Amino acid sequence: MDTFPQGFLWGSGTSAFQTEGAWNQDGKGVSIWDRFTHSSARDPFPKETADVASDSYRRWEEDVEALGYLGVRSYSFSLSWPRLFPDGYATGEPNAAAFDGVQVFGYSAWSLVDGFEWNYGYGVRRGLFYIDFSQPNRTRVPKTTAHYYKQIIADNAREAHDE
């Protein structure tokens, strides 16, 4: 195939850690990346953090203008899970500042799973599905995290639409 199909939509995306900044403001909890970049494990570059990053948390309107300038029609971004739930779990009270004026449609499975695994030092591997690689059919069995994530999607999904 030499060309993209008719109606193909190019998109752009960023992750919270790359762009968000404001790492300790408005009730945000500490993420695994915050903890890592503030630890001695970052040697020989101990002062390199994403505390400010590109400051999209405060400068999102400029970012939207920049996307418009570039002609971006599809953009996916993420918010840090501890910004939404400071204790790292979706069972606690959400951070009201994170939802102020925002309609949340969904969230990344990997950020959710990271929150569960971090508290066990990654000794407990949550994942979404258990796969028995010794079996030829590689049956996927949903783990507890898959059920939680399925509910998050069901509660926050939006209808797909064509332009």
Image (spheres, rainbow, N blue to C red):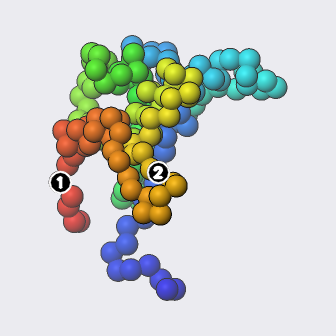
- Classify residue 98 as left or right of residue 1: left
Quadrant for the C terminus, please.
bottom left
Q: Name the residue at 20% across, 49% down.
A: 158
Q: Residue furthest bottom?
A: 1
Q: Is the residue 157 above or below the residue 163 in the image?
A: above
Q: Name the residue at 24% across, 28% down.
A: 101
Residue 78 at x, y = what percent? 41, 39
Q: Name the residue at 21% across, 58% down.
A: 160
Q: Which mark is residue 132?
A: 2
Q: Earlier in the sequence, mark 1 or mark 2?
A: 2
| Mark 1 to mark 2 CA distance (whole Å) | 34 Å
Residue 135 at x, y = what percent? 47, 58
Q: Is the residue 114 above or below the residue 77 in the image?
A: above
Asked if residue 82 can be seen in this view, the reply is yes
Q: How many marks?
A: 2
Residue 4 at x, y = what percent? 44, 79
Q: Amino acid at mark 1?
A: Glu
Q: Which mark is residue 2?
A: none
Q: Quadrant of residue 80 in the image?
A: top left
Secondary structure of the residue carrying numbered label 2: loop
Q: Residue furthest right?
A: 44
Q: Nearer the viewer, residue 94 or 125?
A: 125
Q: Amino acid at mark 2?
A: Asp
Judging by the rendered image, the residue that carries numbered circle 1 is 159
Residue 127 at x, y = what percent? 44, 40
Q: Quadrant of residue 129 in the image?
A: top left
Q: Is the residue 84 above or below the residue 128 in the image?
A: above
Contact flag, marks 1 and 2 (Cβ < 8 Å): no
Asked if residue 107 can be seen in this view, the reply is no
